[in-house]
């Protein structure tokens, strides 16, 4: 049998969203970079982002302190103020970096910044720079061209990272990350990648829930790999449910941007009655956790399949110009948003917790960095402020690159190849598809927008059984992408439940009927696999 391929690079980047691409481009001037992504280069969640990037660019109407305070308020007492200040103050420079790389944001000659800035829920001012209503797509396609053209970046698409290779795993002293085993989905061979630095930019875990705004790639791979390797994770109970995902049988995970509410859209019941003012003085501009819970309550109270987002009071020209993607998608499904309200439901949207890092994106393990949604930096606290996520991707990716470039070069010993001598091919995959479906339904029904101790305990017991079944399957049979994703989702589901059971209060995105009040002191939920 031929030996499986072996690769050596200066830096491995797992994931190809905004965080991964920014890191790659920031490193490639001096380092040989491998970008490893399990689908095509642009298939991650970043390209799905509609609203934009939060940054103080209009210094006449806005300032850093307002952005900092808005972020801290949304985070419900759990933000790390130092992280918030660092990321907010680096926002304008990060926007300039994107513009320098060719990103064409929507302009406005009447604004002092030169750009059209919109406002979203939780923001006290207009500070969201955007490219119409498809900012993520515009940013990603622009950076994709830069990445594909760079001679120092080697792309490995359709390559699925299986597990990190650490000193501990090889029986050595210490626990430095030395590389990663990767499944080449074209050849079904497991390849070995070695490098002194590995960057997790693998995104979040929205697919652990039955209903999500995330793409199919969001299966918590980086969080699970880091946990298995020995990294702490934090605040996994804080799963942000976006209030407004399009409700339509032929629309899969299509988000209706926060900006629709920012521009005056009203949430209404089927009879046209608005309801958000009953829940919060900020009405539609309240933070996402409040809006999602309000919609969830109204739907359960009246047995509704959905509620509606109505922006028909705005001129049709305004709607089409500001939301061309949303207008075209809804129109193709028979919904004219200039004349009728949009049916919407909440859906799992963003993983606020993740792998614990510092502000250089360093994890607990030497040689391992985590950036973007996979990481827990302290920026988001108990609830992410709208459009801070893409900002964090750029700021922390550049910070990680700066730290990597400052490290001395170190020679590396050759790593052992993947051993699959004791596994066989599975005769059928029905176990994987059944457990995948059961896990996602279980998480939606028991660990969703509103929780209880009884339901969390039930979820914990069933997830433990699922996890045991998956690990047994993984140990016996040849791996596949579906099995790897299920393995990672089972791990992440367990981490979410463990963090949720640890929190005896309701704070931010975590709401439990058994502890409806907020405690006086905010404490992070931190899990340590080494204990």
Image: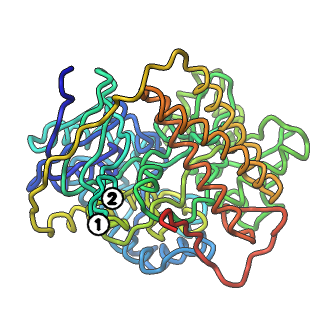
Give the residue drawn at x 64%, y 41%.
209
Q: Taking 198 as reference, is 296 left or right?
A: right
Q: Are marks 1 and 2 in contact (CB under 8 Å)?
A: yes
Residue 397 in which image quadrant: bottom left
In the picture, which quadrant includes the N terminus? top left
Count all numbered tags in the image, as a single digit.
2
Question: Where's residue 183, x and y in %?
Answer: 33, 32
115, 220: nearer the viewer: 220
Q: Which disc is residue 174 wearing?
A: 1
Please tell me which residue lies in front, 3 or 401. 3
Q: Residue at x 70, y 39 (%)?
A: 344
Q: Residues within 10 Å of mark 2 (few under 14, many from 20)?
A: some
Image quadrant in which you'd find residue 302: top right
Element under disc 1: loop
- Image coordinates of residue 153 in percent, x first then y, are 15, 42
Q: Position of residue 425 (x, y in %)?
A: 44, 19
Q: Is residue 121 rendered to the left or right of residue 140?
A: right
Q: Residue furthest bottom?
A: 520
The answer to whether 385 is drawn above or below residue 207 in the figure is below
Calculate the distance from the C-alpha at mark 1 to the C-alpha at mark 2: 6 Å
* 457 sits left or right of 106 in the view: right
Q: Is residue 436 above or below residue 384?
A: above
Please tell me whether residue 43 is drawn above or below residue 118 in the rendered image. above
Please say whether residue 270 is visible from this viewpoint.
yes
Q: Is residue 95 visible?
A: no
């Amino acid at each position: 049998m031929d030996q499986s391929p072996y690769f050596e690079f200066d830096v491995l980047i797992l994931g190809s969203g905004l965080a991964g691409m920014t890191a790659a481009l920031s490193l490639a001037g001096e380092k040989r970079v491998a970008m490893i992504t399990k689908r095509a280069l642009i298939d991650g969640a970043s390209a799905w982002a509609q609203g934009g990037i939060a940054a103080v660019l209009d210094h006449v109407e806005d300032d850093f302190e307002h952005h900092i305070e808005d972020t801290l308020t949304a985070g419900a007492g759990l933000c790390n103020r130092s992280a918030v200040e660092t990321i907010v103050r680096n926002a304008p420079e990060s926007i300039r970096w994107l513009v320098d790389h060719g990103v064409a944001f929507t302009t406005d000659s009447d604004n002092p910044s030169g750009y059209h800035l919109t406002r979203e829920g939780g923001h006290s001012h207009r500070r969201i720079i955007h490219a119409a209503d498809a900012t993520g797509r515009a940013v990603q396609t622009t950076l994709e061209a830069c990445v594909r053209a760079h001679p120092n970046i080697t792309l490995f698409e359709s390559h699925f990272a299986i597990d990190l290779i650490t000193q501990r795993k090889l029986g050595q002293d210490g626990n430095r990350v030395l590389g990663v085993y990767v499944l080449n989905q074209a050849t079904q061979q497991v390849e070995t990648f070695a490098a002194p630095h590995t960057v997790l930019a693998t995104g979040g875990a929205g697919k652990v829930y039955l209903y999500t705004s995330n793409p199919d790639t969001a299966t918590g791979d980086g969080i699970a790999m880091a946990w298995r390797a020995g990294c702490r994770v934090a605040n996994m109970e804080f799963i942000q449910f976006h209030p407004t995902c399009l409700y339509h049988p032929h629309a899969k995970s299509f988000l209706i941007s926060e900006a629709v509410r920012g521009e005056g859209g009203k949430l209404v019941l089927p009879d046209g009655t608005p309801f958000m003012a009953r829940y919060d003085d900020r009405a539609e501009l309240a933070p996402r956790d409040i809006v999602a819970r309000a919609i969830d309550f109204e739907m359960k109270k009246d047995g509704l399949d959905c509620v509606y987002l109505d922006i028909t009071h705005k001129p049709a020209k305004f709607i089409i110009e500001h939301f061309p993607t949303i207008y075209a998608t809804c129109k193709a499904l028979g919904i004219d948003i200039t004349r009728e309200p949009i049916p919407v439901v909440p859906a799992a949207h963003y993983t606020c917790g993740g792998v614990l890092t510092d502000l250089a994106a360093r994890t607990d393990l030497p040689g391992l960095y985590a950036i973007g949604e996979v990481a827990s930096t302290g920026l988001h606290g108990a609830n992410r402020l709208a459009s801070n996520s893409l900002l964090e991707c750029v700021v922390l990716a550049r910070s990680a690159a700066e730290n990597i470039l400052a490290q001395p070069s170190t020679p590396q010993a050759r790593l052992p190849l993947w051993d699959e001598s004791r596994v066989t091919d599975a005769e059928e995959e029905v176990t994987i598809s059944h457990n995948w479906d059961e896990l996602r339904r279980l998480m939606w029904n028991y660990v969703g927008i509103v929780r209880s101790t009884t339901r969390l305990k039930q979820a914990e017991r069933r997830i433990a059984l699922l996890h045991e079944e998956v690990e047994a399957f993984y140990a016996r049979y040849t791996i596949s992408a579906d099995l790897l994703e299920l393995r990672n989702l089972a791990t992440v589901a367990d981490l979410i439940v463990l963090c949720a059971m640890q929190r005896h209060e309701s704070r931010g995105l975590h709401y439990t009927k058994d502890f409806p009040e907020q405690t006086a002191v905010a404490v992070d939920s931190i899990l340590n696999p080494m204990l």
